[in-house]
Image (tube, grey):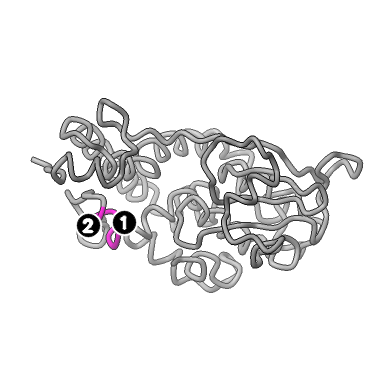
Amino acid sequence: MAIMTEPQTQEKRLNIADKDGQFSKEAKSIPNFVTSDDPSAELPAEKGRYVFYLNLGCPWAHRTNIVHKLKGLQDVIQQKDPLYGFTKHSQLYFKADPNYEGRYLVPTLWDKKRETIVSNESSEIIRMLYPAFDAFVEPSLRESEKPLFPEDQRADIESMNEWVYDTINNGVYKTGFASTQEAYNENVYKLFESLDRVEAHLEARKTRFLFGDHITEADIRLYPSIARFDVAYHTLFKCNLKTIRHDYPRLHEWLRTLYWDKTQETNGGAFGNTTH
């Protein structure tokens, strides 16, 4: 039987679970999109106009950092010290909207020209980065040449994204932040059922990556959770029925491949170089 830590201690420490003990990842999303096909658009793709705010240890921010490096956007979208002399991330949100009442999230994509937040939703930001800035990167890194979201695999990728997000990406938090034994049990078993499912998927396909021999969005979205699993989620979040290293050989091989690869496939190490 899986056993969580003592409920009152955990709830007092985190104070983020609902009354039924379930963790709910609720946040105010700011969904704007940079476009590449209309120079007159409100948010056109321009070199040097946009800035990324990231926490290098955050798995949601990590996926955007991976794509930033895979696409070779280091000289196009800056990652820099805070603008305006700000010392708190909340100050950026209040500059964009003095009446903002949501959480202060990373990743945050900032528009220096309009002095506002473009987006703070990682899944939308990475989709934005695939094609929007391709005019400023090497031809071999463009979405038309090296697709991260290939049209013929989109339905399968979207399907995997849905359950990976719910039971793995967010599942580790629903497990670790549960404040009742019932909520913990409900989520920890779903988490490991999904890890079993990924392992079976890799075993059946016998490919380097989730959907073939080239990296796709599915790899990008899963990687930050698996990279942190044994060292953080297994211990701190009590996701401790199994470990990736000892119990999931195909998933462990997939993780090692992405982490250590320094070839053109990862643009010189986009996964390993952004893992913190």
Q: Which residue is the site of mark 2?
A: 235
Picture residue at 54% right of the left edge, 46% below the top: 104
Q: Is residue 2 left or right of residue 32?
A: left
Secondary structure under the numbered disc 2 in the rendered image: loop
In the rendered image, residue 252, in percent from the top left (x then y), is placed at: 32, 60
The residue under label 1 is 229
Q: Residue at x 27, y 57 (%)?
A: 244
Give the amino acid type for the residue marked by disc 1 in the picture. Phe
Asked if the stretch drawn in magenta spans residue 200, the answer is no
List the single residue furthest toward the top. Answer: 20
- The answer to whether residue 180 is left or right of residue 113 is left
Spatial CA distance of label 1 from label 2 is: 9 Å
Q: How many marks?
A: 2
Label 2 neighbour load within 10 Å: few <14, some 14-19, many 20+: few
Of residue 74 and residue 117, the one placed in the foreground of this image is 117
Q: Which residues are magenta?
A: 229-236
Give the vertical position of 208 relative to 239 (above or below): below
Question: Tag 2 or tag 1, which sits nearer the N-term?
Answer: 1
Q: Nearer the viewer, residue 234 or 146?
A: 234
Q: Residue at x 82, y 52 (%)?
A: 113
Tell me the quadrant of the picture where the C terminus can be found: bottom left
User: Which mark, by number, is residue 202?
Assistant: none
Percent coordinates x, y for residue 238 in the rendering: 21, 50
Q: Is 110 on the left or on the right of 87, as rendered?
A: right
Q: Looking at the image, is mark 1 or mark 2 nearer the viewer?
A: 2
Residue 245 picture quarter: bottom left
Among all residues in the image, which is located at the extreme left? 1
Q: On the image, which quarter does residue 215 sit in?
A: bottom right
Asked if the stretch drawn in magenta spans residue 231, the answer is yes
Badge 1: few (under 14), some or many (20 or more) residues near its Cα, within 10 Å? many
Tag 1 and tag 2, C-beta contact below 8 Å: no
